[in-house]
């Protein structure tokens, strides 16, 4: 997320993140969406658009892309529900994007686990 947000757009993004997490969990009935985590919302300075960064826990890249496509298809519906929960003059248009940070974190954890396992195996061979 960039530092170009105003304090107000940052506050709106934080509230949108909480509300969207609840709405996706409770209102989106598509089983392909699965367990979605909304990791951040970046609202434009003019409050017209919001980038919603999300990931699907335990999903591969194809499943995550599919979930992004489904949520972008449901963006107007989610925006309408969001407008009823938040007091804003105009609710920003929603653009769902895959957040790769969870994938990178899982990959780094796997690499660390592999190194530790190899070191343990080498230590046993020396004994």
Image (cartoon, rainbow, N blue to C red):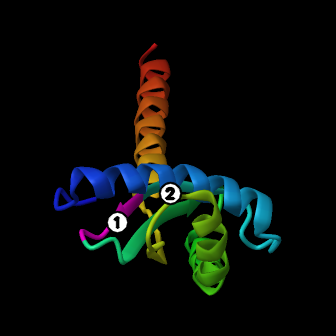
Residue 1, percent across and down? 28, 59
Q: Quadrant of residue 38?
A: bottom right
Which residue occupies the foreground of this view, 100 or 33?
Answer: 33
Would you say the residues marked 2 and 1 are in contact, meaning their CB atoms lie under 8 Å apart?
Answer: yes
Q: Is residue 84 above or below residue 7?
A: below
Residue 52, percent across and down? 46, 66
* Extreme-top residue of the structure: 127
Q: Is residue 69 magenta?
A: no
Residue 27, percent across and down? 78, 65
* Extreme-bottom residue of the structure: 73
Q: Is residue 112 above or below residue 39?
A: above
Q: CA distance from mark 2 to mark 1?
A: 9 Å
Q: On residue 87, which mark appears?
A: none
Graded by Cα atoms within 10 Å as few (under 14), some (14 to 19) or many (20 or more), the crowding at tag 1 reads: many
Residue 62, percent across and down? 60, 78
Query: Who's the residue at 67% across and 79% down the image?
Result: 77
- Mark 2 secondary-structure assignment: helix
Query: Who's the residue at 44% across and 74% down the image?
Result: 92
The kind of secondary structure the magenta stretch mainly shows is strand
């Amino acid at each position: 997320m960039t530092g170009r947000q105003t304090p107000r757009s940052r506050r709106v993004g934080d509230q949108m993140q909480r509300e969207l997490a609840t709405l996706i969990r409770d209102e989106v009935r598509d089983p392909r969406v699965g367990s979605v985590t909304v990791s951040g919302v970046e609202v434009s300075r003019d409050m017209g658009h919001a980038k919603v960064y999300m990931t699907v826990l335990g999903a591969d890249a194809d499943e995550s892309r599919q979930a992004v496509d489904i949520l972008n298809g449901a963006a107007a519906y989610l925006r309408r529900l969001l407008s009823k929960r938040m007091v804003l003059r105009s609710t920003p248009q929603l653009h769902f994007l895959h957040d790769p940070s969870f994938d990178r974190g899982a990959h780094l954890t796997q690499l660390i686990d592999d190194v530790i396992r190899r070191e343990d195996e080498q230590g046993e061979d020396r004994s």
